[in-house]
Amino acid sequence: MRNDSSTMPDPLETLGLDPAQTALYTAVLRLHRATLSELAAAMDGPIDTVGRQLDDLVRLGVVDEQSGHYLARHPAAALGRLIAERLDLLAEESRRIDSALGSIRHLIRDYDAGRDYQSGPFTVEQVSGADILYESVVGIAVQSPTPMDLLTAIPDERTMIDFARKFADPWVDAQRRGLLALRAIIPVATLPLPGVRDQLSRLIETGGQVRTLDRVPSWFMTAGAGVAGLPATWGGNLPDHAYNFYVVRAPIVVGMLHSLFEELWARAMPLPWGRKADGVVQVLRLAAQGMCDDSIARHLGVSVRTVRARFADAMAELGAQSRFHAGVEAARRGWLT
């Protein structure tokens, strides 16, 4: 069988080391401390060439020079720094790509706006009443040839209570029947409200997704690619305005609200529920009561390693730098209620 190992790139080239520098760095590692002459002899190369390569390794920070001797830095520290620098560059490149994608979305909206302008004014219908709002969504879903993507933002406690008590059941049933797929963004302060957890759990069990923000700017929704719902007053809550809203049938408006929703969704946090999340919340709650890892493990009937893994999951999920910080963030988001 043909051996292709010679065609494989040197992994350290990604970090800025060419093959000759990599070979020299390996020699320094093995000798640990050596003079230029000793390294030139080890490499069987001209002193001036090896000297230039050593200067490059010193500039890269993988080798130190002390009184004419070259010392190898520990690879974990030396290469770790190079990896971090490269990751920073990749992150910056990713941000530039995201910016380019954002520009494409703007161009698409311009295209849609021109198309809508050429095809005449789009339909705007003023509607009033909570029953009409929630029933119309199911009606649109029934008429859709494929499962309808429903995006909605709910900004206030009163609208959330109305939804949980009166109007969630038809949407849950529509999801169960495969008529729609819901994604919702809600304020974190609404999680402890009566009935909210039960209804959100049912939405999630039937295929929906819910995330939370500290503050949701306004109510709005999109139903599929052609229908958008806008409040009569942006930022106001629907119950205070008798559930007056506009139904707009135009791809440009749907696209704009869809983009806004995705921006909010990217900043929102998942609910602290589900099998894995419940375990994370359990250890945070017990820690908030002053229990140590061993006590938490005994209380939950799991190993200390599992408890520590859940703490690590909590810190990652909450963007926290310490357990204390994770506890503060969890309390702020209503996870410990």
Image (cartoon, rainbow, N blue to C red):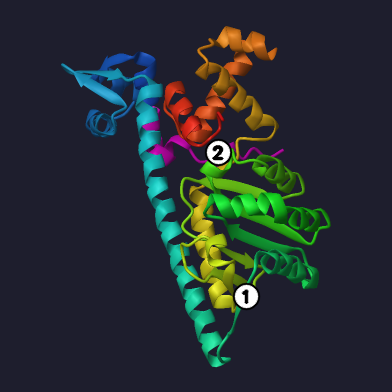
Q: Is residue 303 visible?
A: no
Q: Residues within 10 Å of mark 2 (few under 14, many from 20)?
A: few
Viewer-side residue, 24 vs 194: 194
The CA distance from mark 2 to mark 1 is 70 Å
Question: Considering the numbered disc 2 on the image, is that residue within a helix, a strand or a loop?
Answer: helix
Residue 114, position in %: x, y? 50, 86
The circle drawn on residue 127 is 1
Picture quarter containing residue 294?
top right
- Give left or right: position of 249 versus 84: right
Residue drawn at point x = 47 percent, y = 75 percent: 107
Q: Amino acid at mark 2?
A: Ser
Q: Is 54 situated above or below 15?
A: above
CB under 8 Å between callouts 2 and 1? Answer: no
Question: Considering the numbered disc 1 on the image, is that residue within a helix, a strand or a loop?
Answer: strand
Dividing the image into 4 quarters, which one contains the N terminus? top right
Residue drawn at point x = 44 percent, y = 52 percent: 94
Total labels drawn:
2
Q: Residues within 10 Å of mark 1 (few under 14, many from 20)?
A: some
Dividing the image into 4 quarters, which one contains the C terminus? top right
| Magenta residue check for 190 | no
The circle drawn on residue 235 is none
> Which residues are drawn in magenta?
1-23
Picture quarter containing residue 130?
bottom right
| Nearer mark to the viewer, of 2 and 1 | 1
What residue did someone put label 2 on?
6
- Give left or right: position of 98 versus 116: left
Q: Amino acid at mark 1?
A: Val
Residue 250, position in %: x, y? 59, 79
Viewer-side residue, 75 vs 297: 297
